[in-house]
Each structure stands twice: as structure tokens, then as C-alpha cells.
Amino acid sequence: DAGVIQSPRHEVTEMGQEVTLRCKPISGHDYLFWYRQTMMRGLELLIYFNNNVPIDDSGMPEDRFSAKMPNASFSTLKIQPSEPRDSAVYFCASSRPRAYGYTFGSGTRLTVV
Amino acid sequence: DQQVKQNSPSLSVQEGRISILNCDYTNSMFDYFLWYKKYPAEGPTFLISISSIKDKNEDGRFTVFLNKSAKHLSLHIVPSQPGDSAVYFCAAWGSARQLTFGSGTQLTVLP
């Protein structure tokens, strides 16, 4: 199993540009989570899906952030327009039904200049 | 308001000694706790967990202790090794189908 796959690994973009982060969960995992890691707040949950349906997006910072899961094997997190304060590492994680732990991807380091 | 708190951002320990990482929580509905370990440029990986019906769980050099009355858990690493240097996240599972993470503690094991 290749694990949770995120792309790109690094993204540098200019303020105001659209950024799209991608995630492929582990096959058979029906939960998918997007987290953001910052020094101040640690790992923050942004949004999670169950069977491709968004369940809780209360962690999404503002309307500039959106996430989709068009099928069981793909999800995107989009920021439009991006701002310097969005600079962070973004992680995707997935889990099996009734599992307590998550499997994380390697993350996307986003830098907005 | 953070429901899971790791008040020590960093900890340095000599190789061979014990490392103790602490975590406090505020939500009494949390019933399962996990520790994750994260190396630079990698995602967090599961390390050890404990159910709220237990007060101790051991796995090799790693032991997690849970004090429900104090809403406190700790991770003990004995003996500490340089390869244990990483960021450690405490996480808690409640009624919502999601993990709540602490802010992490950077452990540095000095050779």
C-alpha cells in the first residue's frame, strides 16, 4: 500500500494566486481529513469527509478555503486568493471505518510570498 | 479554546535517560487517547494509544499513563535514543468522529 499521497510536496506562490493541494487516500478508508500545521496552533482540523461527503468544515478559516472530494480516491483543498498567512504545512489523513487512528500523508509545505 | 494542551513546546534529554512528555485535556467526553510522532518533512505516524478504561499502556520503550481525574496523560520513553528526536503530538478521541490534537512537543535526545 502506497499510503496517503499528497501533491505537491512544496508549493511557493504569490499572494492573490489560486493554490490547489491534492490528496489520494488509502483505498478502503472512508474518512478523509485535511489538517493544517502551524507553530502556534499545532495540528488544526480544517474539514473532513465521510464517504466523499463533507461532514464538518467548521475549521475552514474563511471563504477563501474550499475542499472537494469528487470520488473515494481523490480530494482537493483550494485556496483562492492565497495570502501570506496561509503559509503552513497542510496534511491529508485517512482512516478506516471504526478505526481510532489516522494515516497521514507527508504533507504539502505552502509558502505564499 | 484548545481542548488538548501540550504546554511544553520543547524538551531536551540526555541519551539513555527517561523522556516524559505531558498532555492535558479539558473535555471529559474524550474516551481514547493517542500519541503521534513526527519527523521533519514527514507526516505524523501513530505511536501508542490508551483507552479511558485503562491507566497505563506499554509498548517496548514507550509507556502512556492516563490520569482521568486530573485529565492528564503522559508519554514515557525509556531509555531515550537519538532517533526518538521528533515532534510528539497528543490526540484525543471524543463523540465527534475526529481526533483533536495538541500543539506538539519537540523532543531532542542529546548523544
Image: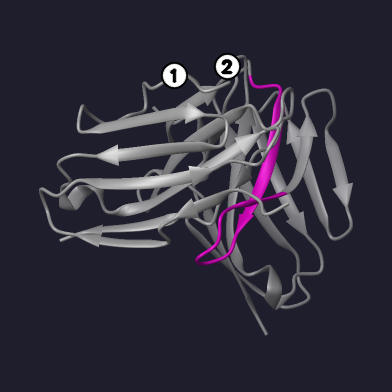
Query: Do discs 2 and 1 belong to a common subunit?
Result: no
Residue B14 falls left or right of residue A113: right
Identify the chain of the residue marked 2, using the numbered disc in the image.
B
For badge 2, the amino acid type reads Ala
> Mark 2 near mark 1, Cβ–Cβ under 8 Å?
yes
| Residue at mark 1 | A56
Q: Is residue A73 above or below residue B58?
A: above
Label 2: state its secondary structure.
Answer: loop
Quadrant in the picture for residue A95: top right
Q: Is residue B45 magenta?
A: yes
Label 2 Cα neighbours within 10 Å, binned few <14 / some 14-19 / many ≥20 = few
Quadrant in the picture for residue B82: bottom right
- Camera-side residue of B96 and A34: A34
Q: Residue furthest bottom?
A: B111
| Residue at position x 56%, y 20% in the image | B27
Residue range in magenta is: B30-46
| The C terminus of chain B - image quarter | bottom right
| Residue at mark 2 | B96
- Camera-side residue of B67 and B104: B104
Where does the image place residue A86, in percent across and percent down from the top left?
24, 47
Of badges 2 and 1, the one in the foreground is: 1
Label for residue B30? none
Label 1: state its secondary structure.
Answer: strand
Where does the image place residue B61, in percent across and percent down from the top left?
85, 60
